[in-house]
Image: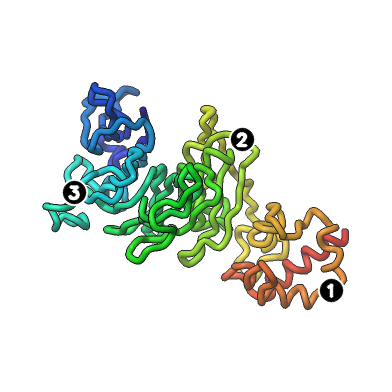
Amino acid sequence: GLLDVALHPAFADNGLVYFSHAVTDGESRYALAVSRAELENDSLHNVERIFLGLPWGQSTSNFGGALLFDDKGHLLITVGDRSVRSHAQHPGLLTGKIVRLHADGSVPADNPFTDRPHTHHPAIYVTGVRNPQGLVQDPETGFIYETEHGPMGGDEVNLVEAGNNYGWPVISHGLNYTYKLIGEGSVKEGLEQPLFYYLPSLAISPITVYRGEMFPEWNGDLLVGTLKSGGLSKLDLLEGRVRSVSPILGELQARIRDVKVAPDSSIWVLAETGKLYRLSREANPVRETLAVGRRDGETIYLLVCANCHDRNVPGTPQLANKQDWLERLQKEPQEWYRNTLEGYRGMPEKGLCEDCTNDELKRAVFFMRNRLKQ
């Protein structure tokens, strides 16, 4: 029943390890728990339980269990609805919620519902979630993102904000397993919409925000691990909106259980097979030292254009397939350049490259035309 592991922000000094797991009351009923222990000489000592996500339930699924220490040192814990949908909207129960605690398990005084002790459990941070599998905080913006399994369809990526209600089971973008609608539809005033949802479901689980120098074109994007499609789902996040979604690493053909950005800004991907993969790119010192405005066409293509023209994005011509470009090659370079600057069909203005100068984009256009004519 082990679900997630997190290190105390001062782990280097205190050695505290936190882990979420399933527990039983001895009568075939189960709940989510969080325990902490001191890691010493490769062994855990002084194990103590600091949280129990009551009520007990008979279901052996929908535990949630994602852990996150935020930038203020609070511990956030996702608790699934334990297959009892109505619990997610019950303000006195911990199931179907994200809770927020101090590192010792006590409740912060500034939690959003501490002023309603007669109706709300004070540990609750947000309500209305189903089976939340992932939590991450963007180290640059401070935003917190959560992933959760929907029913049949409707897996969600949510932006977590204190006191919000994310709607389950009143609203959902998925269906019941009998193909009937759930609740009151997909939208209702006062209930939050997901940042992004998947139809059909990919059984999304871990999530991270990419920040690093190895893949600068991915900075700020969300990387979501999937259990069904066997790879990662990369969400291109810009100004708080998901502009595109791209499947990557599908060749792993394995259920992805964790994804992290390594200290060297490569990406670690942990598969259910027990294999740990590293996604990396060799550094190019020449290109890395080029300032904005001085980058050549190939550099701009690799940083921006290749995200669609080298990724088999449906409906997008691929640079490796000259047949995709035969009609376009009949047009003048200036028309290509104008379409790049202003946007064309499904391609957004400037390919969403905000720091690209017009001259750099022109170089990228000529690089692509020259490559196709070879």
Question: Looking at the image, which is closer to me, 72 or 132?
Answer: 132
Q: Mark 3 — residue? A: 121
Q: Nearer the viewer, residue 198 or 101?
A: 198
- Tag 1 and tag 3, C-beta contact below 8 Å: no
Q: Which amino acid, by three-letter code, is at mark 3? A: His
Mark-to-mark CA distance, 1 and 2? 41 Å
Can residue 353 be spotted in the picture? yes
Q: Residue at x 26, y 52 (%)?
A: 125
Residue 11 in the image: state x and y as whole percent: 30, 38
Q: Nearer the viewer, mark 1 or mark 3?
A: 3
Badge 2 amino acid: Gln
Image x and y of residue 72, in percent: 27, 53
Label 2 sits on residue: 253
Give the secondary structure at mark 2: loop
Residue for badge 1: 331
Question: Along the polypeptide, which appears first: circle 1 or circle 2?
Answer: 2
For mark 1, give the secondary structure: loop
Place of residue 214 in the rendered image (x, y in percent of width and height, measured from the top left) = 57, 51
At 72% from the left and 66% from the top, the residue drawn is: 364
Q: Residues within 10 Å of mark 2 (few under 14, many from 20)?
A: some
Secondary structure found at label 3: loop
In the rendered structure, which disc, 1 or 3, sits on the residue that comes first in sequence? 3
